Image (cartoon, rainbow, N blue to C red):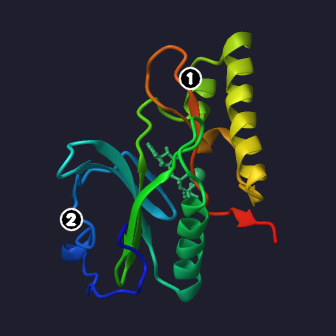
Amino acid sequence: MGCCGGGSDSGGSDTKFQALSARWEIAPDPIGEGGFGSVHLATHRKTGKVRALKAMRLKTADEREDFHNEVLIMRKITKNHNICHLLDAAEDARYGYIVMQACSGGELFDVITRKGLTEREAALAVVDMLSAVCYLHGKRILHRDLKPENLLYKDTAPGAPLKVVDFGRAVVMG
Ligand SMILES: Nc1ncnc2c1ncn2[C@@H]1O[C@H](COP(=O)(O)OP(=O)(O)OP(=O)(O)O)[C@@H](O)[C@H]1O
Ligand SMILES: [Mg+2]
């Protein structure tokens, strides 16, 4: 994983993603957006596997520090059924990049607002969320931003597991 030694890239808009483009082919149209930047699909050039890439604008020293914290915490998380784990990371002068498993099933938030959940689906969602929390707390990681927007279905198959994303507010208990 090549990451976070500081920005060697000039970071202009034409160089966005360049820090990762040797390893990943990145789709320009985002699949998710927010105040932080955008999330894109990224295909690994060697394996052809499709992942999600979160590109975060780093305008201030605080934003860069927050990005480093998010990467540091995600590195403590190994493969887990209910958490999107880190696969690659990099940064340049303007952006920090996090590559993780892609969840194509969408946010729990959208499912709740669009059609609601059956009692069984709600129970399964709680089990998945608590399973992730249990794993994280075992590593003394507090997510601190658990909400339906940060719980994504792995895919659209019936019974697909929910996965926790977004470690932007997470901390490790000393
Ligand atoms: N691994 C992923 N696979 C698919 N979509 C994703 C993935 N990670 C994030 N997204 C989409 O992008 C959205 C924003 O990502 P994330 O929650 O990590 O950012 P954020 O820090 O919450 O941004 P903001 O605070 O502006 O909402 C998610 O709610 C989700 O819709
Ligand atoms: Mg979020």
In which quadrant of the rendered view does residue 125 lie? top right
Q: Which residue is mark 1?
A: 114
Question: Would you say the beta carbon of the disc 2 residue lies within 8 angstroms of ligand 1?
Answer: no
Mark 2 surroundings: few (<14), some (14-19) or many (≥20) residues within 10 A: some
Q: Horizontal and vertical percent for residue 27? A: 23, 51
**Left or right: 131 with respect to 77?**
right
Any mark on residue 167, and which? none
Q: Quadrant of the N terminus?
A: bottom left
**Left or right: 62 with respect to 142?**
left
Q: Residue furthest right?
A: 174
At x 28%, y 82%, the residue is 11
User: For the residues marked 2 and 1, what is the alpha-carbon distance in whole angstroms?
Assistant: 36 Å
Q: Horizontal and vertical percent for residue 161? A: 56, 27
In the rendered structure, are the residues bearing label 2 and label 1 in contact, judged by CB atoms less than 8 Å apart? no
Q: Does residue 51 lie above or below 171 as drawn?
A: above
Report the front residue among 114 and 127: 127
Secondary structure of residue under mark 2: loop
**Left or right: 144 with respect to 20?**
right
At x 35%, y 86%, the residue is 7
Any mark on residue 21, and which? 2
At x 74%, y 12%, the residue is 119
Q: Amino acid at mark 1?
A: Arg
Q: Amino acid at mark 2?
A: Ser
